[in-house]
Amino acid sequence: QVQLVESGGGLVQPGGSLRLSCAASGSSFNFRAMGWYRQAPGKERDFVASIGIGGTTAYADSVKGRFTISRDSAKKTVYLQMNSLKPEDSAVYYCRLDTSFSTYWGQGTQITVSS
């Protein structure tokens, strides 16, 4: 079994920055991709960013140029650097791990962008 633990959420003012971390632990796994999704109250969970084998990245249009996803393979950790945050970025952010056979989700971390 694989566990994902997220950290780095909180309250930030518009225009500010935060960095999320997601560390994978537990059974060994064949990494395919890790990514971040977010869910605002009353809305569906939406894709934010992902990083795959070889470091290939993808971003939602709404965060391109502001968010950067990266990975430390040795630490089995993925990061999401979020800059120029907007109130509409407020949501619960979930980490996702795709392996060769399964998909795992973290418990979520709240990001609130407000003055």
Image (tube, helix red, strand yellow):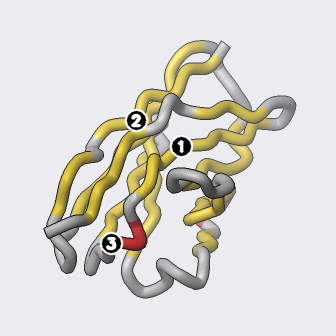
Residue shown at the point (60%, 75%) measured from the top left:
60
Q: Going 21% across and 66% down the picture, which residue do you hit?
A: 114
Amino acid type, residue under disc 3 in the picture: Pro
Tell me which label, 3 or 2, sits earlier in the chain: 2
Q: Residues under labels 1 and 2: Cα distance?
A: 7 Å
**Residue 36 shows up from this direction:** no
Can residue 112 be spotted in the picture? yes
| Picture coordinates of residue 59, whole percent (x, y) | 58, 74
Q: Which residue is mark 3?
A: 87
Task: Tell me the residue that label 2 is attached to.
Answer: 6
Q: Earlier in the sequence, mark 1 or mark 3?
A: 3
Contact flag, marks 1 and 3 (Cβ < 8 Å):
no
Closest to the observer, 101 or 87: 87
Q: Secondary structure at mark 3?
A: helix
Q: Amino acid at mark 1?
A: Cys
Return the residue nearer the eye: 58 or 83. 83
Q: Is residue 36 left or right of residue 54?
A: left
Give SS at disc 1: strand
